[in-house]
Image: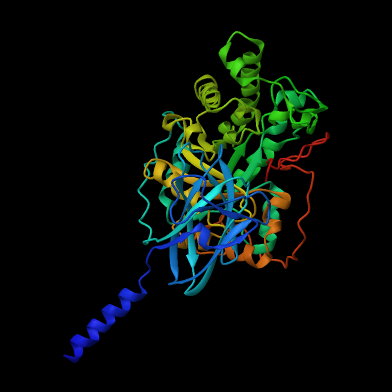
Amino acid sequence: MIASATLLGLVAALSVSAPRPLHFEAEDGRLTGIRVAAERAGFTGSGYVTGFDAPEDGVTFTFTAPAGLYEVRLRYGLPNGEKGYDLTVNGARRSGMFPATTAPYAATSAGKVELQAGENTLTVGNGWGWFDLDAVDLIPVAAPAPLRRVKPRPADPLASREARALLARLTGLYGHKTLSGQYEPAESAFIRDATGHTPAILGGDLMDYSPSRVEHGAAPQGTTERLLAAAKTGRILTLSWHWNAPAGLRDTTYTDAQGRRIEAPWYRGFYTDATTFDLEQALARPDSREYRLLLRDMDAIAGELKKLDAAKVPVLWRPLHEADGAWFWWGAKGPEPFRRLWRLLYERLTAHHRLHNLIWVWSGEKLDWYPGDAFVDIAGVDAYPKDPRDPLSALWDTFLHRFDGKKLIALTEIGGVPDVDRMRRYGVRWSYFVSWTGDLGPRKVPPERLRAVYGSPWVMNAPVTRSAAPKPVASSPVTRSVAPKPVASSPVKRPSLKKPGR
């Protein structure tokens, strides 16, 4: 009887402490700068909250809960179009997007959060503003399932032996280790000096090989050769291309339709607001000068990629990135012209130029822009979280739902350095990450956290080629530099490559 009573007591205790779903009506929270309303029919509870229009606006909930991972689901309404929001849980802040909806209310996942045993606070903040919030749900999350195995089958059926070997290596590590990466050799050297580790992946950009930049005096001065030398030491290369528009560079200052003053010198020619080049029209007329210029530019970049191909160096090739943001001209006309351009570039490099050392990496957030499985090897996310510790679980879950067992998923560009240990607790397991540069790179991260990331057992760095003890690194204030990703020096002024709105 005593044993039975003890067992029943244990079961009862476990059932009490097991995490349960939590539901909060927005109107019951502590409101700052917003109000309760009931005009939009279909709400739950006694109403919803509205009036998000200032940075400090928000609704806060204070509650007790068992420790663990929970998925946050937000029930919202929108007057028009998609909107951004901020979410802060126990001081950890992140941002997300409410997808556009025509329904009175819709629900979206804000990803996973960690709750602590006892008291917790959760705030839904303004973000972009101009949305209504009806309710918040916290749903306990079970332990993440293992990732489904991805077959190391390149999109390019004629992929080189070296490209196949690299893809097989990434596939074998997927879910077990995350490869570290960094754009720009100087930033990579900073990490080596600070941590004693060298990033496994070195990133570069072929921007200054764009013919419209060369015409204005840009000189990449051996960018490809320096990257090739790094590859010979065992580094994996990833290359992007800030493609200066083939024509139509504004090269002036003007006032746009919204009355904003736009600085549009020629060296900002990869931005939508700095060129009049119309991708949709160019693709619609293969006999046009604009179409021929597209091919001319592709051919110029092929010349650099051939140097790597001749040396049997595979490349994580990430062109036409972030098209869905529309801040680059290759995304200005929407998803269909972008997908056509991607496939044209794929065919031009693989079929015409016979470049088979490329592993094709697409990076975006909106999956309706995805070029298709036949043209992509790795699906990537470029992220600039407000808090670099943000595990980006909502983005990961979205991509995992689409690509699990089909494509590797990578954090192809990040502001700062990701907290890989925390991500693993959330079930987020990127194939690799590559940090940005300057004030959006590793220098913004406290030295101790930088060492923790590069020393994590879950992170794989470049093979050790020499003894390298970490040097003390002082925290430095974040500054706004006008320097771009400086993969190579140039005798002409180069633009900032920071993304608009970030």
27 lies above or below 356: below
442 and 2: which is toward the camera: 2
Residue in the image at 36% along x and 55% along y: 146
* Quadrant placement of the N terminus: bottom left
In the shown orientation, is residue 387 left or right of residue 215?
Answer: left
Is residue 454 in sight in this rendering?
Answer: no
Which residue is nearer to you in this view: 57 or 387? Answer: 57
Residue 368: x %, y % from top left: 48, 33
Instruction: Tell which of 15 and 404 is nearer to you.
Output: 15
Residue positioned 44% across, 38% down in the render: 164
Q: Is residue 467 left or right of residue 174?
A: right
Residue that appears at 47% across and 34% down: 376
Q: Measuring 54% from the left and 39% from the top, which residue is drawn there?
A: 363
**In the depicted structure, whether residue 306 falls above or below residue 499:** above
Residue farthest along the top direction in this orientation: 287
Residue 38 on image: x %, y %: 51, 50
The quarter of the picture where residue 288 lies is top right
Where residue 46 appears, x then y in whole percent? 47, 56
Q: Position of residue 391 (x, y in %)?
A: 53, 57
Hey, which quadrant is residue 122 in on the image? bottom right
